[in-house]
């Protein structure tokens, strides 16, 4: 395996223009690597910002080194540290290089300004530059201290920042190259690349040339190739994008005093766990603890045409209708994946050949035209798992709805909307009669389902809400489901039975079905009017 310092050196010596991206902690470093970058810039500005201090050496060099160690531990690509001025004189530089090598860092870039440094974009033309000889000694000290021949010391020339011309920049760069610098970083605060391109022409490939186009970002990248630039550093864009996202989210939460509308627009906690390496820990637990937990799966019933949608479903099933540019089915699959439900089976029927979604197993109910939901579920019996979610294919809901269902610790759980059953409903509502009504002042009520009906009865006004068309099994809940399915399949009217009949059969067999109450935040799509509501519901999501 190629060492990280060797990887960085190969980027500097590459015949192609190479790119590295800023990161400031472990999780952002992993994101950079997953995005496809071959190297990481541990930005001094970004590292200072994530500590909440100024980019004036207010974070100690030991704090910086500790952070980049975390970054190196979670990535396999090289990290180039923005080492400011080397945190002191030649002796500090020697110790810095030794400590960076110990922590798996591939290289360090130091700039020819005085300690403590000030960010180049803050009154740069009033900043004093280091003595050339003193800075050359610092470069030489760093090179003499490294144990890995591939460890890179890059000299950053701040002449343009301090108001000097190209002659001074070249003079300094040449002295630094002669002192042992592996590459030269030429910096500019101009919004146009004139200084950089002039320097590159005069430099004429004497050593690899690195640039940071933060100010002249609109320059076409092809110009950098023509100028024989070796490496481009995108220097602070992850920390800046993170700040923008956090400010927006904080403002929304403060204004709305709820997380419901925010939760689906931010990454899930499970994604944070993934970036932290939770999957590796789970694998280790299975290996060392002989963990027997099973992976969850989902079955989506999507066999119907959607007759009330008229010509919209002439050539495709209802679940393939786009809502704000994304098909219903794709939205459901994404919801499942976000909850780490990666085994998704879709039961198709009408226009089954038009079903298209990434990462699904497709099962076809060939008799969809003459059978009901329960027959479609039976078609997917080979996909049954102990940990399983079953849902209708025409649902749209906020992410917390599925998350609450998945996190239930009961053998069989359903979701009931406690609003009046006719609110925002289309089609035939499934009236849920439960052991207790939704007391929204209480959290985690212990409520069970007593009966489900799709038609008003004498006591219809006493229903407790609407079952939304989702249930979840775990452990023995699967056995309850399969027993009820077997019993119902022997009935002469089996082909017309629905999931309501399944739930009622399970209850009739003496098994408790837990109810999780919600209050809105979902809808089903059965008509053109529903499509319009769905467009509003999913706007921005």
Image (cartoon, grey):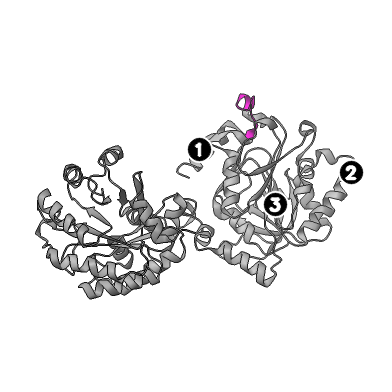
Disc 2, SS:
loop
Disc 3, SS:
strand
Vertical placement of 313 versus 145: above or below? above
Q: In whole angstroms, how far apart are the C-alphas of marks 3 and 2?
A: 24 Å
Q: Nearer the viewer, mark 3 or mark 2?
A: 2
518 sits to left or right of 134 = right
The image's mark for residue 294 is none
CB-based contact (under 8 Å), mark 3 and mark 2: no
Label 2 belongs to which residue?
491
**Picture coordinates of residue 158 (x, y %)?**
17, 56
Residue 519 appears in the figure: no
The image's mark for residue 432 is 3
- In magenta, the rendered stretch is 310-318
63 sits to left or right of 511 = left
**Picture coordinates of residue 12 (x, y %)?**
33, 52
The crowd level at tag 3 (other Cα within 10 Å; few <14, some 14-19, many 20+) is many
The image's mark for residue 535 is 1
CB-based contact (under 8 Å), mark 2 and mark 1: no
């Amino acid at each position: 395996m190629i060492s990280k310092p060797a990887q960085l050196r190969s980027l500097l010596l590459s015949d192609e223009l190479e790119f590295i991206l800023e990161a400031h902690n472990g999780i952002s470093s992993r994101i950079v690597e997953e995005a496809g970058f071959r190297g990481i810039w541990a930005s001094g500005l970004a590292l200072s910002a994530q500590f909440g201090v100024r980019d004036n050496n207010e974070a100690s060099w030991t704090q910086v080194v500790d952070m980049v160690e975390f970054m190196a531990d979670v990535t396999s690509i090289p990290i180039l540290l923005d080492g400011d001025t080397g945190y002191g004189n030649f002796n500090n530089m020697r110790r810095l290089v030794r400590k960076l090598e110990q922590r798996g860092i591939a290289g360090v870039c130091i700039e020819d300004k005085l300690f403590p440094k000030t960010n180049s974009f803050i009154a740069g033309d009033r900043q004093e530059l280091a003595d050339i000889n003193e800075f050359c000694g610092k470069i030489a000290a760093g090179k003499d201290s490294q144990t890995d021949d591939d460890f890179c010391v890059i000299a950053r020339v701040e002449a343009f920042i301090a108001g000097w011309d190209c002659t001074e920049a070249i003079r300094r760069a040449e002295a630094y190259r002669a002192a042992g610098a592996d590459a030269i970083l030429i910096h500019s605060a101009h919004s146009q690349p004139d200084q950089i391109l002039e320097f590159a022409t005069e430099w004429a490939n004497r050593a690899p040339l690195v640039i940071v186009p933060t100010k002249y970002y609109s320059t076409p990248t092809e110009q950098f190739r023509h100028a024989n630039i070796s490496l481009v550093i995108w220097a602070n864009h992850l920390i800046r994008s993170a700040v923008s996202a956090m400010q927006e989210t904080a403002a929304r939460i403060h204004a709305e005093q709820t997380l419901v509308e925010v939760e689906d627009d931010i990454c899930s906690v499970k994604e944070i766990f993934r970036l932290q390496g939770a999957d590796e820990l789970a694998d280790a637990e299975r290996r060392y603890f002989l963990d027997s937990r099973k992976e969850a799966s989902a079955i989506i019933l999507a066999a119907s045409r959607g007759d009330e949608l008229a010509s919209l479903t002439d050539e495709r099933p209802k679940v393939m209708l786009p809502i704000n540019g994304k098909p219903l089915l794709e939205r459901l699959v994404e919801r499942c994946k976000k909850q780490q439900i990666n085994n998704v089976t879709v039961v198709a029927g009408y226009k089954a050949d038009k079903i298209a979604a990434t990462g699904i197993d497709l099962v076809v109910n060939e008799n969809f035209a003459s059978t009901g939901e329960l027959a479609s579920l039976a078609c997917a019996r080979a996909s049954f798992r102990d940990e399983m979610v079953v849902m209708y294919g025409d649902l749209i809901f906020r992410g917390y709805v599925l998350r609450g269902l998945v996190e239930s610790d009961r053998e069989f759980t359903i979701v009931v909307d406690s609003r009046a059953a006719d609110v925002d409903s289309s089609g035939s509502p499934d009236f849920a009669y439960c052991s207790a009504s939704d007391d929204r002042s209480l959290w985690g009520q212990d409520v069970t389902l007593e009966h489900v009906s799709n038609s008003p009865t004498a006591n219809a006004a006493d229903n407790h809400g609407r079952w939304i068309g989702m249930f979840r099994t775990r452990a023995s809940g699967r056995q309850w489901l399969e027993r009820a399915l077997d019993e119902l399949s022997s009935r002469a009217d089996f082909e017309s039975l629905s999931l309501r009949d399944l739930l009622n059969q399970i209850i009739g067999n003496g098994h408790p079905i837990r109810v999780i109450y919600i209050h809105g935040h979902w809808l089903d799509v059965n008509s053109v009017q529903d499509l319009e509501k769905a467009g509003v519901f999913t706007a921005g999501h």
